[in-house]
Amino acid sequence: MGVLDRFSLHGKVALVTGGYRGLGRAFAQALAEAGADVVVAARDEARSVQAAEEIAGSTGRKTLGLRLDVTSRPEVEAAIARVTEHFGRLDVLVNNAGTCVHRPALEVTDAEYDDVITTNLKGVWLPSTVAARWMGEHGGGSIVNIGSISASIVNRPQLQPVYNASKAAVHQLTKSLAAEWAPLGIRVNAVAPGYVKTEMAPVDRPEFRRMWIEDAPMQRYATPEEIAATVVYLASEASSFSTGSVVVADGGYTLF
């Protein structure tokens, strides 16, 4: 197998949670471009179906869009069952769904805290554990969790303490599951992006530019496609000897 062949996902099936917009949309697109058949799953079923159809149209891959609340075990179990019945397999899970509250700790309500922790942590735990049961019985697979540099730094000036804690937990969960599931042939890795420009992330607003852009050695933000390439690497055989890794892609932001 040549080196470029190791990045190929032909014959594989990938499920991306929160995959109809932002980073998730770029991940789903990149996985399809690498050869995978792709499932886009999120709470908004209509937009998931639309994104899946657009990906199919641009790549020629088979796709499926479906509703999925990653915090609901019945919905997760139903989604995994539908994917494996529809495609006959599940090789890659990308846990991308997440949420954030941008306020100081003393202003965060209990409901907001619960929503962030449940979505960002249970929303990784449930899809991972349900998918791993199937993967472990069918030769293994690759799970890619979307963490953040916020797991190791405190973002400023836009404070988000609960999000930071949730992403630190995702990184540690990644390592714990990687150690536990290696004998099953399941690799579990994470990507920790820095500041990425999406319709949901105002990374180039003037009030954020000095701390978010100018403080980074590369002095720019990332595009979703740049982070997507790392997801493809971790999903593919190119990273076959990597598990429990947290790959930082932040333009050098966390070096200081």
Image (spheres, grey):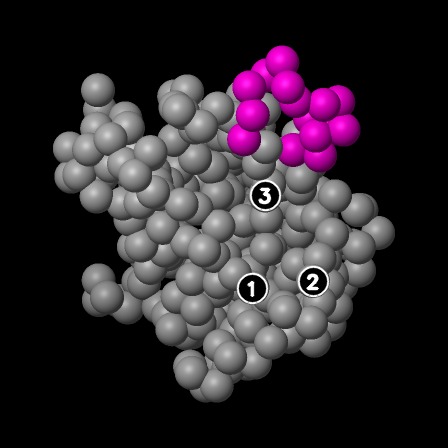
Seen from the viewer's position, the closer of residues 103 and 92 is 103
Seen from the viewer's position, the closer of residues 208 and 89 is 208
Is 77 situated left or right of 245 in this image?
right
Secondary structure mostly seen in magenta is helix
Q: Amino acid at mark 1?
A: Tyr
Residue at image mark 2:
44
Labels 2 and 1 touching (C-beta < 8 A): yes
Residue at image mark 3:
98
Q: Amino acid at mark 2?
A: Asp
Q: Is residue 133 visible?
A: no
The region drawn magenta spans 102-116
Residue at 59%, 66% in the rendered image: 40
Mark nearer the N terminus (3 vs 1): 1
Residue at 33%, 59% in the rendered image: 225
Task: Give the alpha-carbon distance from disc 2 to disc 1, as whole Å.
Answer: 8 Å
Q: Is residue 36 visible?
A: yes
**Which residue occupies the extreme front position in the image?**
206
x and y, in percent, of residue 82 in the image: 75, 68
Mark nearer the N terminus (3 vs 2): 2
